[in-house]
Amino acid sequence: MAGKKIHDNETKTHLLQCAKKEFMDKGFAGASLRGICQKAGVTTGALYFFFQDKDDLFCEVVGNFMDRLNEILREHFSFEVREMESGKAKEHDDSSDFEAVAQVVHELYTYRDEVLLVLTKAQGSSMERMPDRLVDQMDEHNAFICEAMCKAYHVPMVEQSVVHWMSHSQIDMFIFMVTHIDDEEEALRFAEKGVKVSAGRLVRTRQTVGCPHVLTEGTGKEAQIVRVWTKGSEKKHRSFAFCGRPKKRTRG
């Protein structure tokens, strides 16, 4: 890059490409800024002109994907909130969920390398707990949808443990999908099956068959078994395995 200004967009793009390869090969913790600069053919001063530190560089590498994911979720959540607040809870169906899932799957596979960086290579970075933060977002939104729909159908509020299990299951589904399924079309078919685990379907099931009772078995923090059944129909219960969130890693 001799003869070129080091502070141009081309240099920044090249640094991001070299950083992405370094992070993919070694993970965030093992990546070296010096090695990235050597591959990019620039000085560390040039890197620090664009990025504050290694974490800032990592976040920039995965930034386009995170921006698109947040945009899709905001649009979908806002649509459902408007639907609930306008008194249309009983008109809610899964069509918007299918549309959002199709968008999310497409973005996951458009930026699959970046997704895998966040899921498998982010230890030690500020992105390390991103899956947990997504579960928190889903928890808050699913609780809102459940409350609105339970009021509309005049059934008791869904227990928080069940809402959390559902939120965790939704995020875990996408994590499993993107780490195990290579083909986008196959991934979409897989994800569409997961749409059946939704707040709307849970509440409508309550309204149809009666109010489920929920028991939590086991005391361990690592896992609980949440059993849901209809009152008076205990033989027709379904058992769900709910895995607690990963323990926060301590940085060495």
Image (spheres, grey):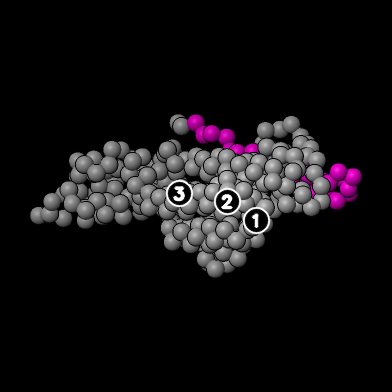
Question: Upstream in the sequence, badge 1 or badge 2?
Answer: 2
Q: Are marks 3 and 1 in contact (CB under 8 Å)?
A: no
Q: Which residue is drawn at 17% across and 48% down?
A: 7
State which mark lies toward you, 2 or 3. 2
Q: What element carries label 3?
A: helix
Q: Do the residues labelled 1 and 2 touch (CB within 8 Å)?
A: yes
Q: Does the magenta stretch include residue 150?
A: no
Report which quarter residue 50 is drawn in. top left
Disc 2 to disc 3, C-alpha distance: 20 Å
Report which quarter residue 98 is drawn in. bottom right
**Residue bearing mark 3:** 70
Disc 3 to disc 1, C-alpha distance: 26 Å
**Residue bearing mark 1:** 91
Q: Which contiguous range is marked in magenta?
A: 227-250
Q: Position of residue 149 (x, y in %)?
A: 67, 46
Looking at the picture, which amino acid does disc 3 mark? Asn
Q: Which residue is drawn at 30% across and 51% down?
A: 16
Q: Where is residue 213 in the image (x, y as percent from the top left)?
A: 80, 40
Disc 1 to disc 2, C-alpha distance: 8 Å
Q: How crowded is mark 3: few (under 14 residues within 10 Å), some or many (20 or more)?
A: few
In terms of depth relative to the viewer, which is nearer, 115 or 191?
Answer: 191
In terms of depth relative to the viewer, which is nearer, 107 or 175?
Answer: 107
Whether residue 229 sits left or right of residue 80 in the image: it is: right
Looking at the picture, which amino acid does disc 1 mark? Glu
The numbered disc on residue 83 is 2
Question: Upstream in the sequence, badge 3 or badge 1?
Answer: 3
